[in-house]
Image (tube, rainbow, N blue to C red):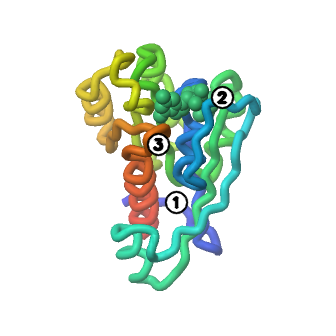
Amino acid sequence: MKNFSKTKSNAFKIIVVGDKRVGKSNIVTRFTQNEFSLESSSSPMINIYTDMKIKPDRSSELRRSCSKEEEEVKFHIWDTECQEEPHSLHLYFKGCHGIMLVYDVTKQHSFESLSGWMDTIKEHLPETNIVLVGNKSDLHNLKTVCAEDGQAFADSHGIPFYEASALDCSNINEAFEDLLQSVIDSRE
Ligand code: GDP
């Protein structure tokens, strides 16, 4: 069982990491606000800091575990832009309960970066919950990383994998809810 401290208010920190322009900001805004932007965000550090309350009716899965305890669970979702500041990563990882690791299915190099990201994650947070997301699945004709490769990488690290699109919404909720559920389950 994973062991991390529960904050007083049942608040959990989730961070979204991956190479630049893989779609991290849009994944977060799609999930939290159901919004998408064609513009790339330019903030050099944390793009968005979102307080999000998951109520028991958020989804059937989350409802099960939340209503069991009749509580409201709060997630702080951090959209990071820290690729060029590896020395500052510990600030992002500090107190983190779950990580969404993102690559772009149209950018092979963002997939090749995953091993480095996993090394960094394991170094800072060896026990954390992780979900792998191959974003931009809507760009079928531009795809250079096949789903089988994404799945194989995820399997080799024992983590869930989703091909998703912040543009057409596919699998964004599913990936987040999988991660948030595992965070809730892990505290017990
Ligand atoms: P970040 O740097 O990882 O936060 O990436 P952004 O969220 O700023 O997105 C970078 C670019 O990719 C922007 O032009 C977005 O509009 C675009 N983008 C993000 N997600 C998707 C997606 O699912 N599909 C498509 N086609 N474009 C996307």
Residue under the image location 46 percent in, 14 percent down? 109
Ligand 1 located in image quadrant: top right
Q: Are marks 2 and 3 in contact (CB under 8 Å)?
A: no
Q: Residues within 10 Å of mark 2 (few under 14, many from 20)?
A: few
Q: Residues within 10 Å of mark 1 (few under 14, many from 20)?
A: some
Position in image of residue 111 (x %, y %): 42, 21
Residue picked out by circle 2: 40
The image quadrant that residue 106 belongs to is top left
Residue under the image location 43 percent in, 47 percent down? 172
Residue picked out by circle 3: 126
| Cα–Cα gap, marks 2 and 3 | 31 Å
| Cα–Cα gap, marks 1 and 2 | 34 Å
Instruction: Tell me the amino acid under the disc marked 1.
Output: Phe
Residue picked out by circle 1: 4
Instruction: Tell me the amino acid under the disc marked 3.
Output: Pro
Whichever of labels 2 and 3 marks the residue nearer the N terminus, that label is 2
Whichever of labels 1 and 2 marks the residue nearer the N terminus, that label is 1
Q: Residues within 10 Å of mark 3 (few under 14, many from 20)?
A: few
Q: Nearer the viewer, residue 158 or 28?
A: 28
In which quadrant of the rendered image does the C terminus lie? bottom left
Instruction: Tell me the amino acid under the disc marked 2.
Output: Ser
Q: Which of label 1 and label 2 is nearer to you?
A: 2
On whether ligand 1 comes within 8 Å of the CB at mark 3, the answer is no
Position in image of residue 56 (x %, y %): 46, 76
Position in image of residue 98 (x %, y %): 50, 50
Above or below, comparing residue 10 to residue 75 in the picture: below
Residue under the image location 50 percent in, 45 percent down? 99
On whether ligand 1 comes within 8 Å of the CB at mark 2, the answer is yes
Looking at the rendered structure, the secondary structure element under dot 1 is loop
| Cα–Cα gap, marks 1 and 3 | 11 Å
Asked if residue 90 can be seen in this view, the reply is: yes
